[in-house]
Image: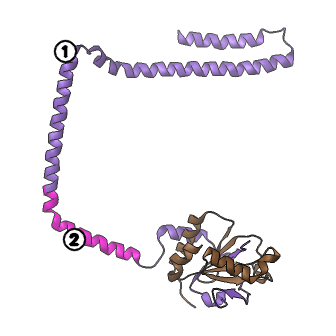
Chain colours: A purple, B brown
Amino acid sequence: MIVKTLTKAWTDNGVGRRDRPDLGHSCAVRLSCVRHQGGRRYRIALLALICGLLLAGCVMPSAMPTQSSSGNQVSQSDQDAKVEAIQTRVAEERAEQASNKEDAMAESGDGVQGQTATVEESGAALSPGPTAAQLELLAKLRPQGEAPELLNEVWLNSEPLKLADLRGNVVLVEFWTYG
Amino acid sequence: MREWHEKYKDDGFVIIGVHTPEFRHERDVKNVENSLLRLNIDFAVAIDNDWKTWRSYNNRYWPAMYFIDKTGQIRYLKIGEGQYAYSESVIQALLAEQYTAN
């Protein structure tokens, strides 16, 4: 039925466009364009509605039994069963946690060894040398030519510096003006 | 900038501010000195009143930062403000780079 409606809407749209000889050519084209968009919107809305209905149809059957069995007595027993199930699960989880703790206690000797291993590893990571991410960045920062020497004689906060004397250092030269 | 100076100066990182004046009053070294005090800047600042260094860098912008690696090569040029996190990661990477003196 929905499909029929949809097809009808579609055909109506098309027929409506062609069956207006009273309209001028450009006007008809303009109108048909507007209408076309309107029709499309209409179709999309319909499709969305159908999809929604189908989805609801899929979801509802699973939800139905609980709704149908929503008599007072049944729901009461349902709730009781649920509470029981939750209590059992909590008890099980507690037992599991306790046993895990015991395991952890038993393995504490191994734990200490594991810790020292981690410390050794991090020590290796601290040794000089760029990280993988830094290597990647450095590969992107291609040399753009040797930095021109600084040619100034008047300096503040320092004796005159020369880049040539600063090899082995990373230097940031910033041109600025206080104004 | 000041933060980077404090943070990395002991790791082989040197900041050099090249003060190239745009207007006449900025040529007065005393004014620059006062601004350093005011801004609490204690890294080295070259007074480039005759635009010598500016010209040798072929620079066009304030501010412009040239990041120079341990071998003296320009590796990154940052024009204008902003992107400080990225610039700092550039400094860290350049500091981590291996260097063997010739």
Label 2 neighbour load within 10 Å: few <14, some 14-19, many 20+: few
Residue B80: quadrant of the picture? bottom right
Give x and y (percent) for residue B55: 79, 79
Q: Residue at x 24, y 68 (%)?
A: A114
Give x and y (percent) for residue B64: 70, 71
Q: Check disc 1 and report its element: helix, strand or loop.
A: helix
Q: Which residues are magenta?
A: A102-126
Is residue B40 visible in the rendered image? The answer is: yes
Instruction: Give the residue type that dot 2 points to.
Output: Gln
Q: Residue at x 26, y 69 (%)?
A: A115
Q: Dot 1 falls on which chain?
A: A
Q: Dot 2 falls on which chain?
A: A
Q: Check disc 2 and report its element: helix, strand or loop.
A: helix
Label 1 neighbour load within 10 Å: few <14, some 14-19, many 20+: few
Residue beneath label 2, please?
A: A113
Decide whether the magenta segment is chiefly helix, strand or loop.
helix
Query: How far, Cα to Cα, is label 2 from label 1?
Result: 59 Å
Residue B67: quadrant of the picture? bottom right
Q: Is residue A121 magenta?
A: yes
Q: Answer whether labels 2 and 1 touch (C-beta < 8 Å).
A: no
Residue beneath label 1, please?
A: A73
Is B89 rendered above or below residue A83? below
First in sequence: mark 2 or mark 1? 1
The answer to whether residue A64 is left or right of residue A138 is left
Q: Residue at x 28, y 19 (%)?
A: A66
